[in-house]
Every structure is written in structure tokens, then in C-alpha cells.
Image (tube, rainbow, N blue to C red):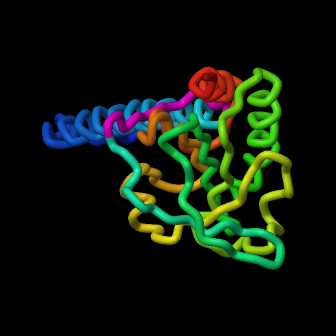
Amino acid sequence: MPERAPETCSGPVPRYRDTAATLASVLGAGALVAGLAASAFYGARLLAVYRGSFWVTARPGVSAPVGSRFVENRQGSRDTLALPLSTHPTLLLVYSSSCKVCSDNMPRWLDLVEELRRSGSTATVYAVDLDGRDSLGEFWPDIRGVTRVSPADRDAFLKWTGVPGTPTSAVVRAGSVDAVMVGIVGPHRRRYLVSRLRI
């Protein structure tokens, strides 16, 4: 008995099917390329943040508001004071006790303070509790030469410094914000901050 040929559909494939398949392939390839590019871009930014080599912004000429007040957080007392920001180079380490990244960054801030002192800098260092919840010093450790304060007017402080969030390390020179670094302080950032705080 002769073998039967396999059954097939006869006739040409409709053109719209070819067009739809080609379009779907092009769109899929484009989406894949865009996704890979976005992943690489944001991955590189995240890596840069954690290595401490991300952006530095400055606000030259934007001076501290006259009479800007802070509350010094000490065990058993809360005194209001004005920081001498126009006379000495100053380092502001801005944190929030509810900020997980601030906790991760704490050892790096301590390294920064230690390196600053080793360099011979006499810059003043303030740990600025942005939310005012660390009145007992349970978040920021009691470090010699670091004064814990909270801004009396949080909104005015943020407007003046341009601090977008925590953790932030800011350098103030002659009353103006010289550098603002947001995120983890890696070796590159640490060296830069120390260089801006030498007198």
C-alpha cells in the first residue's frame, strides 16, 4: 500500500500575519534592549552610591539664615544654640534615627571623623538629627568632638542646605554650603570631604 503524503494547508500565508510577527519581534527586541540599558544604568548608579563616588552638589553664596537655631541634644538637657557656621569649616552629618541606610553608613561616618582628626583639621562636626527623635543619643554614639543637634526649624534648615534626605554629609564654609553628598560615604567621598575641611 503506498504511503500517504502528510496533509498540509495549501495557499499562501496571509500577509498581515507576517507583519504582526515582525512587529512583535521588533517591539520585543526593543523592550529587551531598553530593559537591559535601564538595569545597567541604575545598577551603576547604585554601585556608585555604595562605593561613595556619586554626585557632589554645592550651593555657593547660599548663606545660613541669620539667627538659625539648633537644639543641642545632651543627656538630661536640651539647650538652644546658634552654630558658628560663618567662622569655621563645619561638617554636618545629617541623619534620621528611622533611616536604615543611616545605620549602614554609621561606621563610615565614624571613619570620616577619625580621618578628619588625623589630618589635623580643626573643623567643627555636628551630627544633625533631622527628626529630633534621638534626644537620648541612642542612635548616634557619644563621640568626642561631635555635637548632636536638631534644627529648631526643620523646613528652614532643609531649604538652606538643600539636603534632600538622609544620610547626607554636608560641608559648610564661611556660612555657605560648599558640598552636599547624599548616601553612603565611601573612601572617595571621605577623601573629598576631608580635603574640603582642611583650613
Left/right placement of residue 25 relative to residue 168 reads left
At 61% from the left and 28% from the top, the residue drawn is 197
Image quadrant containing the C terminus? top right
Q: Position of residue 7 (x, y in %)?
A: 38, 41
Left/right placement of residue 193 relative to residue 159 reads right
Left/right placement of residue 183 relative to residue 145 reads left
At 46% from the left and 51% from the top, the residue drawn is 163
Residue 154 among those drawn in magenta: no
Which residue occupies the foreground of this view, 151 or 188? Answer: 151
Instruction: Point out the stretch of residues depicted in magenta.
Output: 51-61
Corner quadrant of residue 90: top right
Q: Is residue 64 above or below residue 192?
A: below
Q: Position of residue 39 (x, y in %)?
A: 50, 36
Left/right placement of residue 157 relative to residue 132 reads left
Corner quadrant of residue 25: top left
Q: Position of residue 43 (x, y in %)?
A: 56, 35
At 42% from the left and 61% from the top, the residue drawn is 67
Q: Position of residue 28 (x, y in %)?
A: 36, 38
Residue 137 visible (yes or no): yes
At 85% from the left and 48% from the top, the residue drawn is 144
Which residue occupies the foreground of this view, 41 or 56? Answer: 56
Tally of marks: 0
Residue 52 among those drawn in magenta: yes
Residue 4 visible (yes or no): no
Which residue occupies the foreground of this view, 55 or 1? Answer: 55
